[in-house]
Amino acid sequence: MSTLTDQTAPKLTPKDFASDQDVRWCPGCGDYSILKQVQTVMPDLGRKREEIVFISGIGCSSRFPYYMETFGMHSIHGRATAIATGLKASRPELSVWVVTGDGDSLSIGGNHFIHLLRRNLDINVLLFNNQIYGLTKGQYSPTSEQGKVTKSTPYGSIDHPFNPAALALGADATFVARSMDRDPKHLQGVIRKGYDHKGTSLIEIYQNCNVFNDGAFEIFTEKSSKKQEALFVEQGQPLLFGDNNEKGIILDGFTPRIVDIGSDHTADDCWIHNASDGVKANMLVRFFDDPAMEGHLPRPFGVFYAKERPTYEDALNGQIAAAIEKFGSGDIDKLIAGRETWTIN
Amino acid sequence: MDKEAIELDSVVIRFAGDSGDGMQLTGTQFTNTAALFGNDLATFPDFPAEIRAPQGTLAGVSGYQVHFGSNKINTPGDHCDVLVAMNAAALTANLKWLKTGGTIIVNTDGFDAKNLRLANIPEAENPLENGSLDKYAVKRIDITKISRAALADSGLGTKEIDRSKNMFVLGLIYWMYNRSIDGSVEFLKSKFKKNQAIADANIKLLKAGWNYGETTETFVSKIHVAPAKMEAGVYRSIMGNQALAYGLVAASQKSGIPIFLGTYPITPASDILHELSKLKNFGIRTFQAEDEIAGVCAAIGAAYGGSIGITSSSGPGIALKMEAIGLATMLELPLIVLNVQRGGPSTGLPTKTEQSDLMQALYGRNGECPVVVIAPQGPSDCFHMAYEAINIATRHMIPVFVLSDGYIANGAEPWKFPESKDLPEINVGFAAANTSGDKFMPYERDENLSRPWAVPGTAGLEHRIGGLEKQNVTGNISYDADNHEFMTKLRQDKVNKVADHIPLQTVDNGPDSGDLLVLGWGSTYGAIKTAVNTLRDNGKTVSHAHIRYLNPLPKNLGEVLSKFKQVLVPEMNSGQLVKIIRDKFMIDAMPLNKMQGQPFTTAEIVKKLEELV
């Protein structure tokens, strides 16, 4: 189907994508930054506002559509992915975005989440991961670290957490990326790449909840530790990190190992990132060590995996087109009459 | 020899065998042939939930009853004239349905020691030998042996041959009722066109069965049931789920709005998905979701995008969808919810029928969440009510429940089908692009209190909606106390407005006033109709009204009810419509209930009516 976009229309600005509603997240919430980055990227997509739809579930992040001057639906808990599936399947020309949180997509909506990924509709999923339930005021979430003390886990959480990127790859997602609220440029870049990918794009965004889980990602986002703890992957580039990229990751057989660059190893020895390599992507998303652990691997950010395969909506609408081609448009009177009729005079 | 034919007005045949014996196919084939001949008819398939329950056991018995006649047939018949029993378990499970003096056709091979044991019958009490069947005309045929002999040279294995023996039965029944085998021959050729040997074997046994009737002395005469004197026109045979699907397609074609079905397989609703998934060249999108919730949510997403969003299920699946149906109510989007009811609660009785989800449809969501509820009264009426559901949902921007049930879904009847040009127009318009520069108001309302269907892709209509309480007109989130009360009433008023567009309640049978009105809904129509006819034929005064619009109720229903001294409400539940009637009209309506997973027999209703008049 052709896009609705009229290339002659005047270019929109980020402001054009801000609705007239007051933004009501807590002051200092990471959601503000994500909203701003999305609004910044939007004009560059070259789409009209009316072609864009944001669908969310329930949770703090799910207020997002109210603040976008596009079409939007604030739906029910965990179901945004399923609602978006119906919309995209029937209106493939629209640009459909899902805004969800760690509870919304990985707890109550876990089922729809994995099935969206395997079906691969061309939908962009922004998963705001703050590792806590904010809207219900501070219970642990399916991404909270084990042992976390919250209102519902006074003795510490005993749940093993999900690793959303690994879960997504396990569900055969065709685009898996991670970014953070505190790095606007990186986040904008990843959002844009997600949009450009034809297929479901899962973008996990580390988002600080300064009220109920302040500093959860501090070690990856604060200047003092970011370069040591966060590994920014770029297509075709070696996996390097550290204050002056003095560390690298090499593959020792099937084991990723941290090496010092300069003495025994050069950057050329390192693992060269290739987002179309599914096997390596599966290893990369498993870089999920507790930063407190001795000898831990850094946490990767960027596009881990991107490989297109046919989308669900193209296959669905392709079957319809093929059936019409083969049998002609349906004749309702023939259908109702069926093959065998009899006449009573 | 040419045996003479006896003329009968109507006959009920019950085919019963193991669930692998092909009794449903045998029954369906006989039904199609009878329909093409011009008989009126009604059918009742009765099968276990298990696909292959243990062979030979009572749990594995599958039955198919067909009632055909030269007069108006409203029910599959309380009791059968002929019982086909392929084994001991089938006989044991179904003998209670046979009329005294009726004919039993038994496959004697199904009464060997093993089959008796599986049917829990001590060998000494073999019903074929102990005289317990003396009050019936028992025709003993070793169908298995004859079939194997007939196909000895076919090259097929014993297992394949035994699987074809139902065609012998069908051929024999065709002979008994003076029917041509030609339609079934064509059917078999087409069904097994990729396997000539199987097609030939089935056709050979079909003919063998017919010849058996013609040449042996087992049957002295044929029976002739003349075509029914039905209204002139062109007819076909239709089943309920099929009619639901066609009604939806017709409404889609008539309105020009494409269908999106989001669903999850469940008995007895899956055939709706099967039907619609075939019809891709009608532009129909079917989506087999990961679960019931995703099914309805995808339908809502499609409705938001301008499709007719439909979800289909049965009781437990509907329970899972309820939160999303509440969202559709709040979003004020058209949504069709097809509930093919079955016995409940929980998994309940998947293959058995019940009308126990009326309260669920009316009240089964959180908050006050009124929706439109309508119910077809028979297989062909499913077409009209599905069509009506889309008409209402799109005109009023509201979810519409269609309550069918297992009995209607799998039952077949002749249908004088309409031409699409005669179907009512469905005028649906999407909101036009807004170039005024004024902010678009998604919850502005028309004379039906319906809001505009503002689909993405339309310039100037950008807006946000959601499950949080809405401010009227703007659609913005509102926690205002007065607004919530206003919107709660408005959502009810929207449903009430539908009453301006639906037909007034009529009395289907009998005078408009009197001592007793039988008030039914859904699939009890045929049994009530026949029961009321029985009493009227005996000079009693009884009337029958059948409600197809359950929410809102027809505007004049109170007036109709007020003209009768007594109102009896038969239902296949413990009394749901009767509660509504008592609540809304403050009358002492009486319940008549059946919760056995089986439809009412005519006799059960007649008995109650005789007590009352």
Image: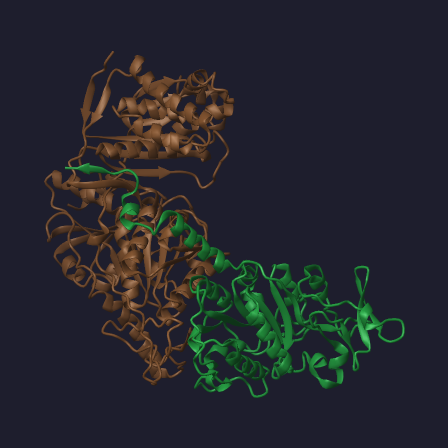
Q: Residue at (37%, 38%) from the top-left corner?
A: B46
Location of residue B408 in the rendering, given as x and y in whole percent from the top left corner: 31, 46
Relative to residue A243, is residue B363 depicted above or below?
above
Q: Is residue B458 above or below residue B33?
A: below
In the image, residue A319 above or below residue A281: above
Residue in the picture at 28% in, 72% down? B450
Q: Which chain is brown?
A: B
Where's residue B476, x and y in %?
39, 81
**Front-most of residues B241 and B516:** B241
Q: Position of residue B539 (x, y in %)?
A: 10, 40
Pinpoint residue A190: horizontal percent, then vertical percent: 61, 74
Q: Is residue B434 visible?
A: yes
Instruction: Assign the N terminus of chain B to one quadrant of the image.
Output: top left
Q: Quadrant of the C terminus of chain B?
A: top left
Asked if B602 appears above or below A122 in the picture, the reply is above
Question: In the image, A165: left or right of B425?
Answer: right
Q: How is the image coloured?
A: by chain
Q: List the single residue furthest toward the right.
A: A263
Dividing the picture into quadrants, the one containing residue B472 is bottom left
Identify the hue of chain A. Answer: green
